[in-house]
Amino acid sequence: MTEWIGGTFTSDVGWDHLERLVDIGDRMTGSPGEHEALAATRDALDQVGARDARVETFPIQGWVRGDSAVTAADRTLASIALPRSPAGSVEGRLVDLGDGLPDDFDRDLDGAIVLASSTVPDHVDRFIHRREKYYRAVEAGAAGFVFRNHVPGQLPPTGSVGTDDSPIGEIPAVGVSKEVGSRLARRHEGEPVAVTVDCETPDADSGTVHADVGPTTDDAVYLTSHVDAHDIAEGALDNGAGTAMVVELARILAARADELDTRVHLACFGAEEVGLVGSGHAAARADDVRAVCNLDGVCAGRTLKTHVGGFGGLAAAFETVAGRYDHPVTVVPEHLPHSDHWPFVARGVPGCMVSAETGDRGRGWGHTEADTLDKLERRTFREQAVLLADVVVELARADADLAPVAVEEIAAAIDAQGEAEGMRLTGDWPF
């Protein structure tokens, strides 16, 4: 009964796929690299015994990076454009908003270039997403947006702007390193600075890899990840590791198919990094989803963390497996509406996001060029594969408590978390 554990601790299948993904290079949404990664993931799932492995494509708004610049006192400072920023050049007085908390925007920002951090202080009870800060700047009349990393190392951060209805943002937006941001705030607060973004916005296609393991039941437990990554990095953590883990778990579950009461549907989405487009496309068309276990940020640390949003059956599965192996797992009873489980949860489907404990708030190396394979450990990958395989088996039990809930309950929970105002501002409020 436990031979599969030994096989997992000697398997290179998932890790080899992780190396395959990071070696592709640019996996930006809609790029040739993303399409190559989708095809490679389809083939990997087929090779480990998943059935009907395929890629289904869908149209998206493309965005291709050009040059960008932040100019202050006739000096050009290092920056990168935020994906889906519009092209353009703007000038205005620099206003440093520090952490970019909601109250920080309550001032005269008309025509300003806003500078805001990529994190929030520990005393703030929710993480404020980059896009919320961007659209607060837009709403306040700012002319440009500069997103300053809080992690040292000359690492300008990336991350998309735009909404479902208007995929290209309203004002030019760039990311700068902690060091450049500190220089801007110290030397140029209140002075004129310029932000320039050059980009192309072609029509494009993305896609989602689909496959199945286990019995051919009508309903399925969805095991998901996203394949795309920002073009500036290898995307090892975000989210090559998640997709590689889906491949490794597919190998394990195909061999343990007789333990599954419910079909496990494998879905590796494209276009996550530009607003959950791939998972949103799938959720709007799926009528077989019993629950979603979404992997996004696994292997960042050795201890798994999962946001279960108050779904008792999901929490029970992780807690059961943690007890079985005497291995810690952090179970967070809140929703996290910023990854590919969310379009399903917003429809009342039990769903969780699985990441890992890092000891830090924010993305760490994520969304920077430092998101590389050397940050991850094969040992951690294998340990987490054992735990996650048993979690999926628990979720696929016929008696698992995975009843859908009323959409109104989801909306009320998000409102109670303090997320509603920001999600309405960014066009992400689905209720």
Image (cartoon, rainbow, N blue to C red):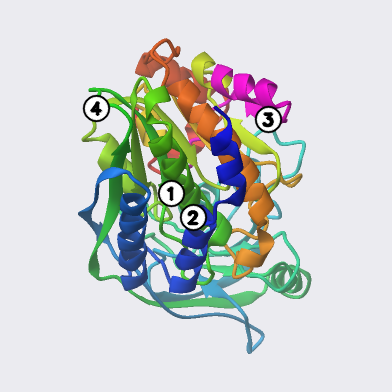
Q: Give how far across and how far down residue 285 sits, in percent.
A: 21, 35
Quadrant where the image shows the C terminus? top left
Kindly identify which residue carries mark 1: 247
Calculate the distance from the C-alpha at mark 2 to the C-alpha at mark 3: 27 Å
Residues shaded magenta: 316-339
* Mark linked to residue 330: 3
Callout 4, which amino acid?
Answer: Thr
Earlier residue among tags 1 and 2: 2
Kindly identify which residue carries mark 4: 216
In this view, 198 is above or below 255: below
Q: Is residue 396 left or right of residue 419?
A: left
Earlier residue among tags 1 and 4: 4
Callout 3, which amino acid?
Answer: Thr
Instruction: Determine whether the residue tagged by mark 1 lies in a helix, strand or loop.
Output: helix
Circle 2 Cα neighbour tier, 10 Å, few/some/many (<14 / 14–19 / ≥20)? some
* Mark linked to residue 8: none
Whether pointer 1 and pointer 2 mark residues with C-beta atoms closer than 8 Å, the reply is yes
Earlier residue among tags 1 and 3: 1
